Image (spheres, rainbow, N blue to C red):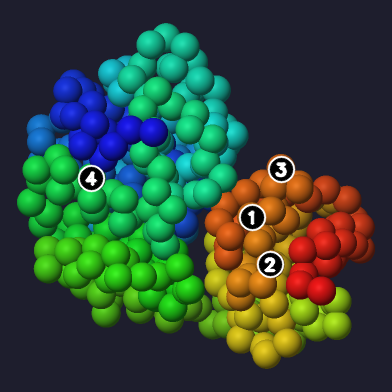
Amino acid sequence: MNTIQEIAGVLRRLKSAVIFTHMRPDGDALGSAMALHRALFMLKIPSEVVNEGEIPQKFLALEGMETIRKAPAQDAEGYICVDCSDEARLGYLQPVFLEGAKRGKVTVNIDHHVSNTRFCKYNFVRNRASNCENIAELVRALGVKPDKLLGDYLMTGMVTDSGAFSHSDVNGDTFREAAYAADAGADVSRITYEIFKKQSKARAQMYAEVISSLRYELADALAIAVVTKKTLEKYALKQDATEGIVDFALTVEPVEVSVCLMEVKKGQYKVSLRSKGAVNVNEVAATFGGGGHVLASGCMLFGDLEEVVDKLSFAVRQRLPQ
C-alpha cells in the first residue's frame, strides 16, 4: 500500500482528474469526493465528480453538490476512487473506470473499508470511522489550507459515517480530523440538522410504519426492518428516504444485529447491516458478495422475502457468540 505522502505526490502531478465514488452515495462518499475536488481546485488541477445515481436530497443543501455528473465530461489523466471498496461498487460507471484504466489512466484509490481490494495502481486504505478522515489527512499532505466549503464537505462525511460521532470505531483521530474541519469553518449544527434531523412529514410517517413492523429473529438478537416498494410509493418517497432506518433497532437492548431490507424490485433486496460488536457484519455481507466494515456493511440479496430473511438469519446465527 502507498503512503498518504505518495498519494499526494501522484495527485499533484496530475493535469486533470475524474473523481468516482460508490453507487447509492451517502454522506461520506459525497463528502470525500467533493472535499478532494475542492482541494484539487485550490491546486489549480481541473477535476469533476461523477456518480451513477441520484444525489440524496438532504445533501443538496451543500453548495456544489448539484454539479456532480453521471458520467465524465472530460478525458482526464487521472481516475480517483474514494470511499469505494472495489470496482463493482461503481455501478454503471464500472465499465468507464475499467476502460480508462486499460487505456493507461493514473488510477488512485483512497478508502476506509476493511473489504477494499486495492484495485487501483496507487492505493491508500486506512480503516477509520469515515473516509473523510483519510481525505483530511490527504488535504494536509497536498499542502492545501481548507476553506469553509472544504471543511463542510469533510464534516459531512465524518458526521454521516460515525453516526454523529457515536459509533464504536470513533477514536481520538476521528475527533482530531473533525476539529480540523471545524477550524476551517465547517457548520456542524447545520450539517447534523440536514443529515439526521430534517425530514418531511411523509418520511416521518413511513419511518413510523416500518419501525412499528420490525421483525425479531434468533431470540431477539437479530432485528429486521423491511421497506417495500409499495411502502415507498404509498408515501411518494425515493429510496434515499430509507437511510438511517437500520440504526434504530440497535437501540433495542437484546438486539446484536440490525438489518434493513429495501425492496429494489420484485425478488431483489438491498441489505444494510449494523452490529453492536458481537457479530462481524462484514463477514455476513461477504457471504453474499457484499462488504464494508465490521460494524456496518451491505450487500444485495435475491429471492422472496422469507428466503432472504432465512439466508440472513442463518449467516448471523453462525457468527453469534455461543
Of the residues under marks 4 and 2, which one precedes in the sequence? 4
* Residue located at (26% from left, 40% from top): 4
Mark 3 neighbour class, 10 Å CA radius: few under 14, some 14 to 19, many 20 or more: few
Which residue is identified by label 4?
Answer: 138
Which residue is identified by label 3?
Answer: 289
From the image, which quarter does the N terminus lie in? top left
Task: Choose between 158 and 26: the one closer to the eye.
Answer: 158
Mark 4 neighbour class, 10 Å CA radius: few under 14, some 14 to 19, many 20 or more: many
Front disc: 3 or 2: 2
Front disc: 3 or 1: 1
Q: Amino acid at mark 2?
A: Val
* Residue located at (85% from left, 83% from top): 219
- Number of marks: 4
Q: Amino acid at mark 3?
A: Gly
Whether pointer 4 and pointer 2 mark residues with C-beta atoms closer than 8 Å, the reply is no
Which residue is identified by label 2?
Answer: 279
Residue 213 x/y as whole percent: 78, 82
Report whether residue 47 is seen: no
Which residue is most to the top? 103
Whether pointer 3 and pointer 1 mark residues with C-beta atoms closer than 8 Å, the reply is no
Of the residues under marks 3 and 1, which one precedes in the sequence? 1
- Quarter of the figure with residue 247: bottom right
Q: In the visual, does 94 lie left or right of 33?
A: right
Q: Identify the disc placed on residue 282.
A: 1
Which residue is most to the bottom? 253
Of the residues under marks 3 and 2, which one precedes in the sequence? 2
Residue 103 x/y as whole percent: 42, 9
Residue 123 x/y as whole percent: 39, 33
Q: Amino acid at mark 4?
A: Leu
Mark 1 neighbour class, 10 Å CA radius: few under 14, some 14 to 19, many 20 or more: many
Of the residues under marks 4 and 3, which one precedes in the sequence? 4
Q: In the visual, does 317 lie left or right of 89?
A: right
